[in-house]
Image (cartoon, rainbow, N blue to C red):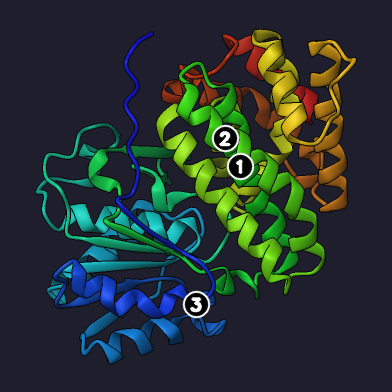
Amino acid sequence: MGHILFRTTPRILIGPGCIEQIGLEVKALKGGKVLIVTDPGIIRAGLLKPVEESLQLAGLPWSLFDQVEPDPRIEVVEECFRTARQEQADCIIGLGGGSSLDIAKVVAVRLTNSGKIDDFFGIDLIPNPGVPVILVPTTAGTGSEVTPIAILSDTREKLKKGIVSSHLLPKSALLDPKLTIGLPPAVTAFTGMDAMIHAIEAYTSVNANGLTDHLAFRAMELTSGNILTAYARGEDLNARSKMLEGSLLAGMAFANAGVTAVHAFAYPLGGEFHHIPHGLANSVMLPHVLRFNMLGNLPKFADVASALGVAAGELTDRQAAEEGLEVIEELMADLEIPLRLRDLQVPEEAIPKMAQGVMKVTRLLANNPRRITLQDAERIYRNAW
């Protein structure tokens, strides 16, 4: 047995109404001037209000950057960084989906490190810790509140790129299921699938270990067991709470075990076709990549099936793994998620270039349970088309 290194966010507050504590969290981190990083949709949905009220109550000054976009470009970090520097922020709150959380994480380290963002892409390339960050997810999706990872869109290369550094882990995360109640059904579906995929990939990664397996297995149970209720009856606080917990546990698992080829296939899709949100790109690729990957570790893919509710008693590992795929396709049909790339207006002639894009995502392919060649990548995209 090798050694296991496990890292996560040091303070996690979870439960309905916990957002009211955010002023106290800032004070505990000795924050004086807060910058809130979010997007216009969060403001429209009224989710900024409880944060403002709590900061006001704690007597803390704050300023706002609300121009985060989905799958944010590198330029958005620079705009937000300029605001943070101007306002002399010494504590950053990220409020929203994965994009806002990622921007908050990167801006915090931009404030304390010289150089360009391009210098940070890759693993452990950030010299100094950033200013303290508190993250508040409003989707049960990316798990960004417990990962040392931020993903940005490089518009020049039409690829999504990752920054991985322990300095990106926030100091504190607040998970309030009440903030996810107003999520539209489609967003609930895409982000919920994203969380479930994090769990499946962490469980089947070659870097999985006993600790991450426990977290990922529970995350698969929670997400697959509650996503339909959260989708069909969005105001159900119990289902929303369980989805948020599932997303958190999946984030903890993949932050330490890594994700695999589903994400590697999703990146060129999102980079090339900006209208496809990350969770949707992942979902469309999921059945096709799993079908290819399962041969690399049938017992583990049989476990995935049982976490998704397949009664694997009399089945061989192969049969159970196949039934797990059927459960996933049925879930996607219920959530009205397309199963084909052509339904997302992706032209067939884009496949060779996207396959080359997949091969560049070496950080994730290294975790994959089965080796992937360029020919495999093309074939998987064609199966998905």
Give the residue type at disc 2.
Ala
Residue highlighted by disc 3: 17
279 versus 119 height, above or below? below
The picture places residue 18, in percent across and down from the top left corner, at 45, 73
Indicate the quadrant containing the C terminus: top left, top right, bottom left or bottom right.
Answer: top right
Question: Residue at the spot x=63%, y=48% of the render?
Answer: 279
> Residue 8 occupies which quadrant of the picture?
top left
Q: Gap between marks 1 and 2, in whole Å?
A: 5 Å
Identify the residue at horizontal 11%, vertical 54% (top origin): 112
Question: How packed is label 2: few (under 14 Cα within 10 Å), some, or many (20 or more)?
Answer: many
Q: Regarding mark 3 in the picture, which secondary structure is present there?
A: loop
- The residue tagged 1 is 219
Q: Which residue is mark 2?
A: 216
Are there few (<14), some (14-19), or many (20+) residues within 10 Å of tag 1?
Answer: many
Whether the residues at callouts 2 and 3 have beta carbons within 8 Å, the answer is no
Does the rendering let one see residue 142? no
Mark 1 secondary-structure assignment = helix
Q: Are marks 1 and 2 in contact (CB under 8 Å)?
A: yes
Where is residue 173 shown, x and y percent of the image?
Answer: 38, 60
Amino acid type for the residue under numbered disc 3: Gly
